[in-house]
Amino acid sequence: MVMTDTELTEAESNIDVSPNNTSSDENISDNGFNKVAIGVLIGATLGGIAGALSTRGVVDRVNRTVRDVGNSVKKAASSVDDTIRQVGDAVHSVTTEVNSTVKDVGDAVKDATEGVSSTVQSTVNSVKSTAADVNSTVQNTVNAVKDTTGEMIPSNEKERNVTEQNTLYKLVPVNSNEAGS
């Protein structure tokens, strides 16, 4: 079927053309118009800025300002870098000193414990030696006393003197109950 310009298709004949009805074609054209209007505004703004900047004095001031801002950022970055390096060096120095101090303290404690151990061992050895010397001296004294008393009284005379000259008494305890009865 061939269509002419005046003939409407079935889908086109069902379109409502009342003023309250907004079709998708109208939304598209309104949306497109809005985009064009925004583009014109942006273009006009940029054109105005470009026109204002076209004078040589304004361009020089903008360039100088951008250069000054760039130099300030470089100086700030360099200052931050220097500060971080100084902090890093300080931390390194502190950790090195702490490590050295801990080693020195550890060595001092080790030396002190070894000295205490040596002193305790020599004290124990001295006490052992003194005890052995005292024991030997006591043994020698006992032996000397035995030898001396043995020489003074012969052993058979000891028994005779005890029996002939002395009387041996045996003490027996008496109960207080028995004593009074």
Image (cartoon, rainbow, N blue to C red):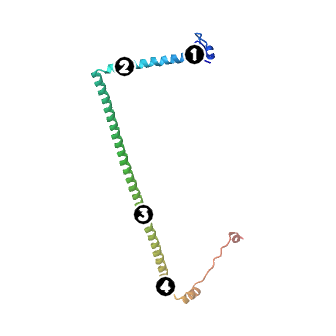
The residue nearer to you, when weighing 143 against 135, is 135
Whether label 4 touches label 3, CB < 8 Å: no
The residue nearer to you, when weighing 175 against 131, is 131
Which residue position is annotated with label 4? 147
Q: In this view, does 55 lie above or below 106?
A: above
The residue nearer to you, when weighing 95 against 113, is 95
Q: Distance between the residues labelled 2 and 4?
A: 138 Å
Kindly identify the residue that appears in the image at 38 percent across and 21 percent down.
46
- Residue 47: mark in rendering: 2
* Circle 3: element type: helix
Q: Give x and y (percent) for residue 26.
A: 54, 15
Whether label 3 touches label 1, CB < 8 Å: no
Could you tell which of marks 2 and 3 lies nearer the N-terminus? 2
Which residue position is annotated with label 1? 23
Query: Outermost residue toward the right?
Result: 181
Which residue position is annotated with label 3? 114
Near mark 4 (Cα within 10 A), the count class, few <14, some 14-19 or many ≥20, is few
Q: Give x and y (percent) for residue 88.
A: 36, 44
Could you tell which of marks 1 and 4 lies nearer the N-terminus? 1
Q: Nearer the viewer, mark 4 or mark 3?
A: 3
* Circle 1: element type: loop
Q: How far apart are marks 2 and 1 (CA)?
A: 36 Å
Q: How far apart are marks 4 and 3 (CA)?
A: 49 Å
* Circle 4: element type: helix
Near mark 2 (Cα within 10 A), the count class, few <14, some 14-19 or many ≥20, is few
